[in-house]
Image (tube, coloured by chain):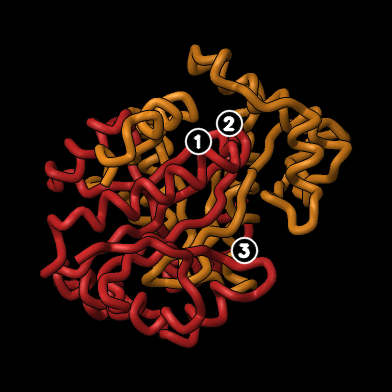
Chain colours: A orange, B red
Amino acid sequence: MPTTIRAGEKKDMQAVFALIQELALFEKRPNEVHISVADLERDGFVNPPKFSTFVAEENEHIIGMALFYERYSTWKGTALHLEDLIVTQEKRGTGAGKALYTAVLKKAHTQQYGRVGWEVLDWNTAAIDFYKSTGATILKDWFVVQMSPEKLATYLEQPSDENF
Amino acid sequence: MPTTIRAGEKKDMQAVFALIQELALFEKRPNEVHISVADLERDGFVNPPKFSTFVAEENEHIIGMALFYERYSTWKGTALHLEDLIVTQEKRGTGAGKALYTAVLKKAHTQQYGRVGWEVLDWNTAAIDFYKSTGATILKDWFVVQMSPEKLATYLEQPSDENF
């Protein structure tokens, strides 16, 4: 069955959300998904949109998606960031993932972005090997740092002379 | 001398660029800076801007800057990303860095972002310890992946049956 790739529309956000949940469940972190279908339908379709998607379709059924948005590098200027690339478990190995990946890279090439970036889990050697085979560079000397709204609030509750 | 923090304006981009160059030189990678002052003046002040800045000023002289923009997490929704936090070498240790950092976190808190994120070099233990002390989480199981426009072009030049 042929896989087709097209830009995601508002009506696809239910399926996109299902893929996000499927991956979180697979990673044993279902409670980490704080967004909803309504959030995706709003945030992806406001002006300007906060993200864009490509979806992979087989017989008019969505089997995968890539979600991406712009970033800004102080070395390379406007960059495209691939936040998520998900293919539903039973359709992995069918080429849908590579087709989505290639669609994002084509967009970055056509629109002359100064860089494409994404992140990969260090144990995902199959993905790492694939990315390397396409010419991507795996940077091993950077840590990703994150702060939650709760930790933010705790930090900012400190007396301000402690902060400065 | 007191340090003041304020939003960066177009007239500050020359000083912001000088800080970007200073850091690249310090990291022995001055040729990696492909952007110009004109790029920053355009990209930070188009509608919508591709990034925002805070600058640290001492006697009306800019000694540091933080550059940030929105990202989108499929778990947490709209997130704030701190791309660069730079204080000119002779002014490190004066509290300007912490003041800039706190200004960014305050903005994220006030505007109710679902997450704040950034990246840190794995050898920069002083920065890592500081971030941890403020409640940030250092994720050690992710690799940052990047692809240059040149590698992109090479990948996309392959026959399309190789791509799918």
Residue B58's quadrant in the figure? bottom left
Would residue B101 be found to the left or right of residue B50 on screen?
left
- Amino acid type of disc 2? Lys
State the residue position of label 3: A106
Per the rendering, the mark at residue B115 is 1
Residue depicted at 52% across the width and 64% down the height: B51
Q: Is B14 in front, or is B75? A: B14
Number of marks? 3
Q: Can you say which quadrant of the picture contains the N terminus of chain A?
A: top right
- Marks 1 and 3, Cα distance to the nearest angstrom? 29 Å
Q: Are marks 3 and 2 on the same chain?
A: no
Measured as percent of width and height from the top left, residue A143 is found at 28, 41
Relative depth, front residue between B30 and A130: B30
- Residue sitting at 73 percent across and 41 percent down? A56
- Residue at label 2? B76
Q: Answer yes or no: do the residues labelled 3 and 2 have beta carbons within 8 Å? A: no
Give SS at disc 2. loop
Please name which of the two marks, 1 or 3, marks the residue nearer to the observer: 1
